Amino acid sequence: MAGKYADAERVLVKVGTGFLFGEDNGGYRFMGDQMDALADEAAELSEKKQLVVVSSGAIATESCKYGLEIPDNEHERAQLAGMGQPLLMQEYASRFSKHGRICAQCLITQDDITDRKRRRNLRMVQDGYFARGVVAIYNENDTIATDDITFGDNDILAAKLACCIDADIMMMLSKTVNGLGSGGKDSKEKAKEILAQEKIPLEIINGR
């Protein structure tokens, strides 16, 4: 990592659904080349820095693989998320393994950060991943997240996680795709506010 953040030791990268999926004749398609490029850069970065990834895309992964429409019902979306999360992790794991990197799946809810005991446990587990050189990939545990414990958006999850693990910088890889994800200007502004409280800089890389 060059430039003004060259001294950053702990980096959190948030990958938006729109970064990994593109629109295709009214549907969506997985942009494998995007994940290839991400894995190449991230694996190289993880050799010198402590890296954490927050990745959206579980629902879209299941939808694309089986040609399913993305429902409006939150419980049906949660079901698709549970079905698509292992597939999304397979995509990450296969690509990182080419660089000799192991990935860990970490599904959390807001309670894991706001509850003191669970927050401490999260930090200890993540410190262990750092020590082992494992790239932890976080997402919200949509199958159990209810209104009172949901982050609402992975931009918010990523910002709160960055504060929890004392990240030196948070980077967002983002591109808007209609119908996929709920992130937008508002969630990014909220994430920026959360990070500002801990003086963690935010860089948004918009587009491919």
Image: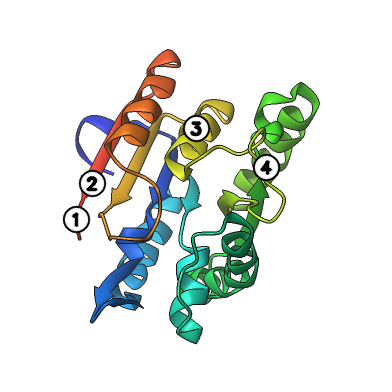
Question: Mark 4 is on which residue type?
Answer: Thr
Q: The C terminus lies in which quarter of the figure?
A: bottom left
Badge 1 or badge 3: first in the primary sequence: 3
Mark 1 or 3, which is nearer the eye? 1
Residue in view at x 45 percent, y 52 percent: 46
Label 1: which residue? 207
Helix, strand or loop under label 3: helix
Vertical order, 79 against 8 (above or below): below
Question: Mark 2 is on which residue type?
Answer: Ile
In this rendered view, identify the residue nearer to me: 60 or 159. 60
Cα distance in 3D space between marks 2 and 1: 7 Å
Mark 4 or 3, which is nearer the eye? 4
Residue 162: assigned label: 3
x%, y% of residue 166?
52, 26
| Corner quadrant of residue 20 | bottom left
Residue in view at x 62 percent, y 59 percent: 78
Cα distance in 3D space between marks 1 and 4: 31 Å
Discs 4, 2 touching: Cβ within 8 Å: no
Helix, strand or loop under label 4: loop
Question: Mark 3 is on which residue type?
Answer: Ala
Residue in view at x 28 percent, y 60 percent: 178
Label 2: which residue? 205
Question: Mark 1 is on which residue type?
Answer: Gly
Cα distance in 3D space between marks 4 and 3: 22 Å
In this rendered view, identify the residue nearer to me: 32 or 145. 145
x%, y% of residue 199?
39, 17
Vertical order, 149 against 133 (above or below): above
